[in-house]
Amino acid sequence: MKDSLRKEHFYSHPIDRVWKAITDQSEIAEWFLKADFKPTIGYQYTLTHEDTTISGKILEASPVNKLVYTWIVSGTGDVETTVSWQLTEVNGGTQLVIEHKGISNYPDEKLATTMFNSYSGGWDGCITNLEKYLNKIVHVK
């Protein structure tokens, strides 16, 4: 069982614009999930979608480069994993690396494998939705 996954994507948008999209709760709600979120160390955030709640604590927030938080999905035994977002300015755009670690913390291998697959597909969708959102707001302005 793999313990972590890593996703990378280049956005042709300035790093401060990508940072705002991943840290501002009203923007997070536009492209990801309904959010009670502040990029402040120690803040207890909540993301919700239908019957699923994701909660955790902000561990690191270094504008505009790094955001790290714990990730606990309701109904999975309060297992804590960690998500990090690393942003790097590249040629006027932004290189994003998302890492999700601690997936082997789930108590049984079947659940861990299910969660790994869910997270992998979920983060792929997240990357795509963020791209669409960033492209949309550029054209609105």
Image: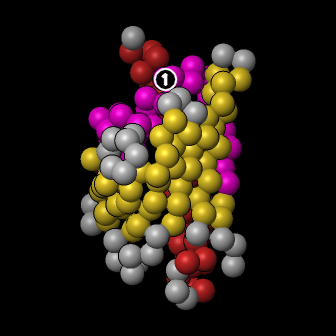
The N terminus: image quadrant: bottom right
In this rendered view, identify the residue nearer to me: 96 or 102. Answer: 102
* Image quadrant containing the C terminus: top left
Q: Is residue 13 magenta?
A: yes
Could you tell me if residue 35 is visible in this image?
Answer: no
Q: Does residue 82 show up?
A: yes
* Residue furthest front as drawn: 42
Give the vertical position of 115 relative to 43 (above or below).
Answer: below
- Amino acid on which disc 1 is placed: Arg
Give the residue displayed 43% in from the left and 29% down from the top.
20
Q: Name the residue at 46% across, 17% down.
A: 138
Q: Quadrant of residue 28?
A: top left
Q: Residue furthest top?
A: 141
Q: In the shown orientation, is residue 7 left or right of residue 81?
A: right
Residue 120 coordinates in the image, percent (x, y): 60, 60
Q: Quick check: 34 left or right of 116?
A: left
Please name whichever residue, 62 or 50, is drawn nearer the observer in this view of the structure: 62
For this orientation, the residue located farthest to the bottom is 108
Quadrant position of residue 51:
bottom left
Chain part drawn in magenta: 6-35
Secondary element at image label 1: helix
Residue holding disc 1: 17
Report x, y in % for residue 37. 32, 45
Q: Residue at x 33, y 41 (%)?
A: 38
Residue 89: horizontal and vertical position, in percent?
66, 24
